Amino acid sequence: MPGERPVRLCVTRRLPATVEDYLRTHYDAVFNPSDVPMSRAALHAAMVEYDALVPTITDRLDAELIATEGRRVRIFANFGAGLDHVDLAAARTQGVVVTNTPGALTEATAEAAVLLMLMAARRASEGERELRAGLWTGWRPTHLIGQSLAGRTLGLIGFGRIAQRTAAKARGLGMAIRYFSRNAASPEIEAALGATRAPSLEALAAEADIVSLHVPGGPDTRHLVDRAFLAHVKPTAILINTARGSVVDEDALAAALAEGRLAAAGLDVYEHEPAVHPGLLASSRAVLLPHLGSATVEARAAMGMQAAANLDAFFAGIEPPDRVA
């Protein structure tokens, strides 16, 4: 309406061009052309200069930041599903709405989980490194022998959307599906995926040939995979993590790989990213990707437009569809 102040929007990282174009058209949007994570001081300034923030996992939005004196920001429209970088309790206390983008990255992240399984099982990273280093001497019968996924048991920890899509893809590779989660899936979902629920986390660890993590980050799941958990895993097993780096005790994982108590690991996330544990970097048994789980054109554009839809709803006075706080 005439005289209304335009909504000022701060977008903390570069987003796909289609998303930035939409936000530029509909908001008084300011972007981050350097694509370097904003400093603490810059985030504090943004809290008083803008009406809304579109943050990502690289922005630590804790209680102190949310309580910034003179805060103008009314909504965090997070670009991503995970929210362990946001103090949700503080946001609720301070009256800041928080939304995320569930569903948009499901397919891409499930693909990444299967990619890591295949790379780790077939020793693809080892082979590529050898070839690029000029060390490949030609084909031979015993060279870099891996293992097939067909006939193996996939153990999923957590059984939400991404885990279920991972299960569907793994079935296409001939894998058996087991899962562990707090609550059992419906009989219909279990039947559709040929999935059965393990009685405990330890039981799943002992059964699975591939253990794939699909739980949220946060204090409840921090170091869920630790030395005690890894003691239950087969020495021929492979660990896959496309969830959150904090779920894995990286000291324990690096030791298990170095000591041959675990065949391999495929990781897309890290506890202190972008820093990676030196023991993992040194391990030929570790397949390491730089947080590419949702990195497809389709997923990243959908995530951005989902964040935009949450903003549109909020500033139209409608409950945002993906509100979590």
Image (cartoon, rainbow, N blue to C red):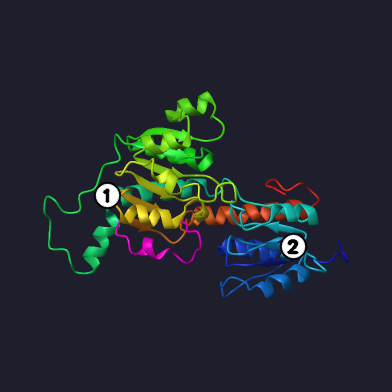
In this rendered view, identify the residue nearer to me: 298 or 251.
251
The dot on residue 65 is none
Q: Give the range drawn in magenta.
A: 268-285
Instruction: Report the predominant secondary structure element of the magenta stretch.
Output: loop
User: Residue 60: horizontal and vertical position, in percent?
Assistant: 63, 63
**Residue density around tag 1, few if under 14, some if 14–19, many if 20 or more, within 10 Å:** some
Q: What residue is pinned by disc 2?
A: 66
**Residue density around tag 2, few if under 14, some if 14–19, many if 20 or more, within 10 Å:** many
Does 100 appear in magenta? no
- Up/down of 45 relative to 209, above or below: below
Q: What residue is pinned by disc 1?
A: 122
The earlier-in-sequence mark between 2 and 1 is: 2
28 horizontally vs 164: left or right? right
Q: Which residue lies furthest to the right in this view?
A: 3
160 horizontally vs 250: left or right? right
In this rendered view, identify the residue nearer to me: 307 or 272.
272
* Image quadrant in which the N terminus is located: bottom right
- Up/down of 259 relative to 192, above or below: below
- Up/down of 108 relative to 184, above or below: below
What amino acid is labelled 1 in the image?
Arg
Identify the residue at horizontal 74%, vertical 56% (top origin): 90
Label 2 SS: helix
Number of marks: 2
What amino acid is labelled 2 in the image?
Ile
User: Residue 218: horizontal and vertical position, in percent?
Assistant: 59, 51
